[in-house]
Every structure is written in structure tokens, then in C-alpha cells.
Image (cartoon, rainbow, N blue to C red):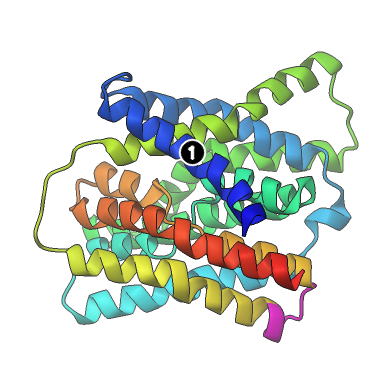
Amino acid sequence: MLSTLEILLPVFGLILAGFVCRKRDLLGPAAASELNRYVVWLALPALLFDTMAHASWQQLYQPAFIVSFSLACMGTFVLILAVRLLRGRPLADASIDAIAGAYPNTGYIGFPLCLLAFGPRSYTETTIATIIVACVLFAVAIVLIEVGLQGERAPHRLALKVFAALARNPLIVAPILGVLIASAHLTLPPALETFLKLLSGSASPCALVSLGLFLAQKREAAASGLATAWSLAAIKLLLQPLLTWWLTAKVFGLSDTLVAIAVVLAALPTGTGPFMLAEFYRREAHITSRTILISTVASLVTLSLLLLYVHNVG
């Protein structure tokens, strides 16, 4: 139990530090947004690029891991989407609800947590999971939201919009460039290596502080949607990792280490991406923001139990 807390406390301690700094007004109302921009546009892309540029094809070519983790994410997404649509929720809003219940925070919490729990060997799997979440899941959600909102439904125009959105996403471009560097067997100059190490080293702590700042922001109180937020958080923290375990261990028969990494990544709380989508498309965001808050706080318990189990079994 002590070793599990030693893994989780630094991670949630940084989140708490950001939360307290915002609540005490030590960092201003724009701090969460600005620090998030730094993480998304500089620090995390540097980490993803550096990881993929030094990865071998043997590390990257993990079809069973990719398929099983993707199926778990998409299965959770489709389940929530279907339920919300059956309850009369508009397609755009149902899509945002679905991604809120299926979007693990691999970028902000996944990297530091898996580094502490499994060591640097987990960087490749965490990067793969981040690409799946940021690319596949985000792309599906954007397509469905656009279909629900756009009067112009020409498939080719919709595809161009989605492609343009993904092509501007640094969390997608950076690892792809890293793969190209690795494929060409190019050696990065020492100065560039140092630059990337300095930037990537700041990704995890800045991301966690940014998440704490985000959670501390005041939002409009809304009586409706609280039960839905709890339901989405429960699906995120319990159903998705269970589905991931079944797919990785029972269907695809991955090694115990890969199963543990995949399940921990799936058990992460909801990331801030769904809230950004809700804000960008000017949809109701109170359900999404509450899901992020509830799942993040509750994950302190669920992740503790999960890591304790993994540690005892391992």
C-alpha cells in the first residue's frame, strides 16, 4: 500500500498544488489556459516526438495492444452514445457526453503515473494510447459533432474539416514526425536532443499543475446533469478498464505487463479534451466539467486499488 501511495501522491500532489494556487489566487484566471497551451503546443509534443524518434519498429509494432486499446475506447464511446441518443439527446451533445466517458487522461496523468509505476518502458505504450485517444477518438467525436451541427453535410467537405483539424493538432503531428525520424534512422544533433529533453521534462509536472488549475476554476452551477456526470465517471473508471482487461488478457492474450499498462491507462480519469470540445462548439459543458472533476477525485481511490492489485500480482 505504501509503494502505491508513493506512486500516486506525487501525481495528485501536483494537481493539488495547481488547485490550491488557483483557489488562493496565486495564479490568475488565465493560468490554466496558458499553461495548458504550453503543454499542448510545446512540452507534450516534445515528449511524444522524442519518445517516437528513439523507438524501434519492434516497440511501435504492437497490433494487439493497439487494436485492444482502441476497441475498449470505441466500445465505451459507442455504448454511451447509443444510450444518450435513445434518451433524446441531440447528436452533437450525445457525442460530447460519449467522449467524456471514454477519454482517458493519458497525456496529463498517463505519462507520469506509468513512468512511476512501470518505468520508462511504458513510454511507448503510453504514447500509442495517447495517439489513439487524441486521433481516433477525437476524430470520431468531431465527425459526429459536425454531422449534428453542420447544415452542409457533403461528405468530402466534412472529411476535409476533420483532416484539417487533426493536421493542426500538435499531439498528432509530433509523434508522426518522430516515427519518420526513426524510420529514416536519423540521429538528432546533441543541441536538439538537449532542447527536447528540457522541454519534455517539463511536460508531466506542468500538465498536472494545469489540470489542478482547471479543476479549481469556478463554473456555472447546474442542478441538471449531476447524475449523468456520476454515471459517466463510473463508466470511465470502472467499465472501461474492465473492458480493456477482458480484451487485452482474454481476447488478445497480451503479456501481464502490457495488460497492466493498458488497464491502468484505461482507468485514468477523464481528460480535459472533451471540455475543450464542448467549449469550442458552444455546447453545454457542465456535464463534461463535472465528469472531469468527479472522475479525477474518485480516481485517487480507484487507481490506488488498481495499482495495489497490480503490485501484488506482479
Residue at (35, 34) in percent of width and height: 19
At label 1, which amino acid type do we have? Gly
Q: Which residue is mark 1?
A: 13
In the displayed structure, 88 sits above or below 198; it is below
Range of residues picked out in magenta: 249-255
Kindly give the residue lying farthest to the bottom in the view shown.
250
For the residue pair 238 and 195, the one nearer the viewer reads as: 238
Quarter of the image containing the N terminus? bottom right
Residue 152 appears at what percent x and percent y?
A: 25, 55
In the displayed structure, 76 sits above or below 211; it is below
Quarter of the image containing the C terminus? bottom right
In the displayed structure image, the side of residue 259 where residue 242 appears, left or right: left
In the displayed structure, 197 sits above or below 91; it is above
Kindly give the residue lying farthest to the top in the view shown.
191
Residue 71 among magenta residues: no
Q: Residues within 10 Å of mark 1 (few under 14, many from 20)?
A: some
The image quadrant of residue 165 is top left
Residue at (41, 75) in percent of width and height: 78
Residue at (45, 55) in percent of width and height: 138
Residue at (32, 51) in percent of width and height: 293
Residue 10 appears at what percent x and percent y?
A: 56, 40
Residue 253 among magenta residues: yes
The image quadrant of residue 224 is bottom left
